[in-house]
Amino acid sequence: MMCSPEEMRIGDFDFDLSFLLNKKIEFNKVNDIAQNYKQLYTIKMFDGLRKLKDNFELKDNFAFFCDFKNYTKYKLWDMTFSGNYPQIYIEDNIYF
């Protein structure tokens, strides 16, 4: 998760998007992906859910790519279809 140095601490955070790559890329590219993934790097599937385009050059480098706005009470929607889901803590969540 990309944060400014003063925010790099344990505390209350609100993130809309999280992804993990196994490849080092420049910050501009990280920012580009975060800002433009809906328009440039994904396609719509069903019910507004998306998946990474097959021709996206980094598609195979993602461990997961989750938009926290797309979820059910049981799981987050992973746009990589890799089967890797981040383990996150949600207060008062009884569905793990």
Image (cartoon, rainbow, N blue to C red):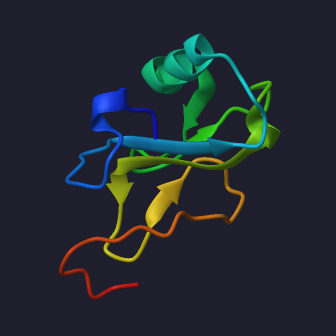
The foreground one among 45 and 16 is: 16
Q: Position of residue 73 (x, y in %)?
A: 31, 74
* Residue 94 horizontal side relative to residue 32, left or right: left
The foreground one among 81 and 48 is: 81
* Residue 91 horizontal side relative to residue 40, left or right: left
- Quadrant in which the C terminus appears: bottom left
In percent of the image, x 58 and y 32: which residue is there? 43
Above/below status of 62 relative to 55: below
Q: Farthest top residue? A: 28
* Quarter of the figure with residue 20: top right
Q: Position of residue 52 (x, y in %)?
A: 65, 37
Q: Position of residue 68 (x, y in %)?
A: 36, 50
The foreground one among 79 and 86 is: 86
Above/below status of 95 relative to 46: below
In percent of the image, x 20 and y 53: which residue is there? 12
The foreground one among 5 and 37 is: 5
Q: So how many labels did they put on this image?
A: 0
In percent of the image, x 43 and y 70: which residue is there? 75
* Residue 94 horizontal side relative to residue 18, left or right: left
* Residue 53 horizontal side relative to residue 47, left or right: right
Q: Position of residue 41 (x, y in %)?
A: 61, 25
* Quarter of the figure with residue 95: bottom left
* Quarter of the figure with residue 40: top right
